């Protein structure tokens, strides 16, 4: 992820370009990994930075921060779950975290960030980033769908279409060519990290997209933007197909049917998301849509599982 320049530079810019916000502040990095965000904050003038991570990478991070001249009085790294560790401070002024997952919420650390916010963030404290918006759009992707999905209809002369139904339920995380997008994007869910609750992360919301050309629709795609609005000049971290590549790529939801759309026609429906009952880091997603076009009339519901 360090090689993901969009991701890393967005965080660096939000911190370095706003050193007045970090000067003499206590900063908490939730899920600190290699400690890169901790070092950004320390270099920006933070009084003390505390990084928390439960994975073994934090052992390497301790070596890294020491090699870069930061002692434990400046950067303290704590190994363990955020919900279980005891920090040496009652409150922090700023929380930084790279918590986002695929489609924003798959395997994300947002629940942990919200715990840290409620337990440690001082009144009026800041969160980096503090806003996120999820987007939905449609794409033409017939060739790849044939390779991934329709392949199972005839496998060396045998009917394996049972696997096809399973493959359709599993979203694909991949880089989508911007030229494949054939609708307007719909920002269907916005999250404010200062106010959102865990309960808000289960939702069912409407969407509507307008076809931008005569084409076929084979799939929906989901991506997100994150914003650092506390900055003097807000910093945006985008992950759409029209933007520079990030390791989050885009998430593709293939449809059973193919929609023949004309420019200006609309596809509307409902996007529902909930943590899986067996594993809360997995997601159950349902997309219901209605399309009444000149060439196609269809109502359908597709259920997906990100696991």
Image: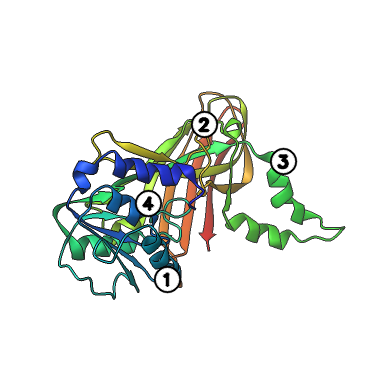
112 and 60: which one is in front? 60
- At 41% from the left and 42% from the top, the residue drawn is 9
Q: Is residue 250 left or right of residue 195?
A: right
**Residue at x-position 44% and y-position 65%:** 281
Q: Nearer the viewer, residue 75 or 9?
A: 75
Residue 238 image offset from top left, x and y in percent: 43, 39
The answer to whether residue 32 shows anywhere in this view is no
Q: Residue 68's quadrant in the figure?
A: bottom left
User: Would you say 163 lies left or right of 286 here?
Assistant: right
Is residue 43 visible from the viewing direction of this image?
yes
Q: Which residue is mark 1?
A: 59
Mark 2 or mark 1, earlier in chain: 1
Residue depth check, mark 1 versus mark 4: number of the one nearer the observer: 1
220 lies above or below 52: above
Determine contact: label 1, label 4, CB under 8 Å: no
Badge 4: residue crowd in 10 Å (few <14, some 14–19, many ≥20):
some
Q: Which residue is mark 2?
A: 183
Count of picture labels: 4
Report the Cα–Cα distance between label 2 and label 4.
21 Å
Secondary structure found at label 3: helix
- What is the x, y in percent for residue 174? 59, 48
Q: Earlier in the sequence, mark 1 or mark 4?
A: 1
The residue indicated by pointer 3 is 143
Q: Which residue occupies 68% across, 46% down?
A: 145
The disc at residue 204 is 4
Q: Nearer the viewer, mark 3 or mark 4?
A: 3
């Amino acid at each position: 992820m360090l090689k993901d320049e969009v991701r890393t530079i967005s965080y660096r810019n939000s911190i370095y370009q706003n050193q007045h916000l970090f000067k003499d502040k206590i900063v908490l990095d939730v899920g600190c990994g290699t400690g890169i965000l901790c070092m950004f904050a320390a270099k920006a003038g933070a009084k003390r930075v505390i990084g928390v991570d439960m994975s073994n990478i934090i052992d390497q991070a301790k070596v890294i921060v020491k090699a870069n001249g930061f002692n434990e009085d400046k950067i303290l790294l704590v190994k363990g779950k955020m919900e279980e560790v005891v920090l040496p401070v009652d409150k922090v002024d700023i929380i930084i975290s790279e918590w986002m997952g695929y489609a924003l919420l798959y395997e994300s650390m947002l629940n942990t960030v919200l715990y840290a916010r409620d337990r440690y963030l001082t009144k009026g404290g800041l969160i980096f980033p503090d806003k996120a918006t999820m987007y939905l759009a449609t794409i033409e992707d017939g060739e790849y769908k044939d390779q991934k999905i329709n392949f199972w209809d005839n496998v060396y002369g045998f009917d394996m279409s049972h696997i096809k139904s399973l493959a359709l339920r599993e979203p694909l995380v991949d880089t989508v060519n911007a030229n494949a997008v054939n609708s307007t994007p719909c920002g269907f869910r916005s999250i404010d990290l200062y106010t959102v609750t865990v309960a808000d992360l289960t939702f069912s919301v409407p969407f509507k997209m307008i076809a931008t050309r005569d084409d076929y629709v084979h799939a929906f795609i989901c991506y997100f933007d994150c914003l650092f609005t506390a900055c003097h000049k807000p910093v945006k971290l985008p992950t759409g197909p029209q933007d520079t590549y990030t390791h989050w790529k885009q998430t593709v939801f293939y449809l059973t049917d193919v929609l023949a759309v004309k420019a200006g026609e609309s596809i509307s429906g409902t996007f529902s998301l909930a943590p899986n009952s067996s594993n809360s880091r997995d997601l159950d997603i349902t997309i219901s849509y209605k399309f009444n076009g000149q060439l196609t009339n269809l109502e359908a519901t597709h259920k997906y599982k990100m696991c």
